Image (cartoon, rainbow, N blue to C red):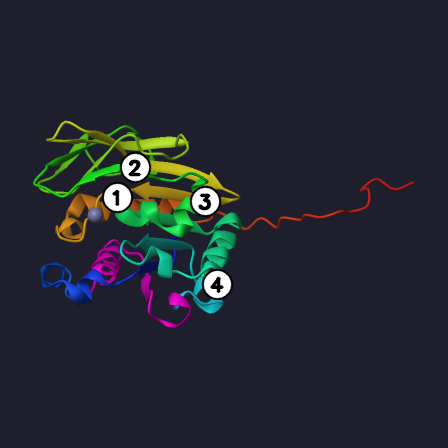
């Protein structure tokens, strides 16, 4: 079954930078949601400036997997919404964090590290090598794919060691980066996927779209588990 996806975007660059608006006239979120639709996945969108950042309990009740893109306005995301989304992930909601979302309050909270890295906006080509053939996230991909121009992200990337490392990127400047990384927090699955700097048409790239669609299917909760905490009496009586 296909997951119900919500694509969240801070949606600021597209409003203030004509170069970005030319690439994503309806916003990065709209481009990703449309691509998911073409892969048969129902996707709605939510943005920072909506009430509750568009992430009301009603929206999250209807969300199996949340996709997150943010950059300029990480600190404008309220702690209340970070708490709410973290709690959803711990209880099984899937989360796909894209590109500069590495610096979001939400991702840093879930990782427990700084999530710092190196970066350079230039003319680097990115080659993403598939390290997990047979993994659901790489379904339909070859052994590598290429993004002609992207921002460079370089190691060291201060995150916990991924449970599965799906992609490593090489850049023409010589750097490498762990660009596709799987984690579990509580019962929720998390995938960090590196590409997607706002001034490049990365989310129009067919293989990038395929990875996000595959990741949405992978991250969807398979069943709901009721977790009980606290101070119960013994289960054996008498
Ligand atoms: Zn960027």
Per the image, is 104 magenta? no
Q: Which residue is mark 3?
A: 110
**Magenta segment, which residues?**
26-53
| Distance in Å between CA atoms under marks 4 and 2 | 27 Å
Q: CA distance from mark 3 to mark 1?
A: 22 Å
Q: Which mark is residue 211?
A: 1
Between circles 3 and 4, the one closer to the viewer is 3
Q: Is residue 82 above or below residue 57?
A: above
Work out whether residue 117 or residue 167 is closer to the camera in this orientation and state it: 117
Looking at this rendering, what residue extends furthest in the bottom direction? 51
Query: Can residue 5 be seen at all in this image of the molecule?
Result: no
| CB contact under 8 Å: marks 2 and 1 | yes
Q: Nearer the viewer, mark 4 or mark 2?
A: 2
Whether the residues at callouts 3 and 2 have beta carbons within 8 Å, the answer is: no
Q: Which residue is mark 4?
A: 61
Q: Is residue 161 above or below residue 183?
A: above
| Spatial CA span between label 3 and label 2 | 16 Å
Q: Residue 42 in magenta?
A: yes
- Is tag 3's residue or tag 1's residue first in the polypeptide sequence? 3
Looking at the picture, how far across and down is residue 57, in whole percent? 49, 66
* Image coordinates for residue 97, horizontal then vertical, percent: 33, 48
């Amino acid at each position: 079954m296909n997951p119900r996806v919500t694509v969240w975007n801070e949606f600021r660059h597209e409003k203030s930078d004509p170069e970005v608006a030319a690439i994503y006239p309806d916003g990065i979120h709209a481009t990703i949601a449309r691509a998911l639709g073409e892969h048969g996945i129902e996707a709605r969108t939510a943005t920072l400036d909506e009430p509750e950042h568009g992430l009301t309990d009603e929206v999250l009740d209807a969300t199996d997997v949340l996709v997150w893109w943010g950059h300029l306005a990480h600190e404008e995301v309220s702690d209340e919404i970070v708490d709410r989304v973290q709690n959803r992930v711990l209880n099984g909601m899937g989360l796909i964090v894209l590109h500069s979302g590495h610096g979001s309050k939400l991702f840093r909270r879930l990782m427990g590290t700084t999530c710092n890295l190196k970066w350079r906006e230039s003319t680097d080509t990115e080659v993403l090598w598939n390290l997990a053939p047979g993994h659901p996230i790489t379904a339909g991909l070859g052994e590598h794919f290429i993004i002609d121009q992207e921002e460079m992200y370089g190691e060291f990337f201060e995150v916990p060691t991924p449970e599965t490392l799906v992609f490593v990127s090489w850049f023409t400047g010589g750097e490498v980066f762990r660009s596709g990384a799987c984690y579990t927090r509580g019962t929720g699955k998390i995938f960090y996927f590196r590409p997607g700097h706002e001034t490049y048409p990365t989310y129009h790239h067919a293989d990038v779209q395929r990875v996000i669609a595959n990741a949405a299917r992978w991250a969807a909760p398979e069943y709901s588990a009721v977790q009980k905490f606290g101070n119960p009496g013994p289960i054996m009586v008498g």
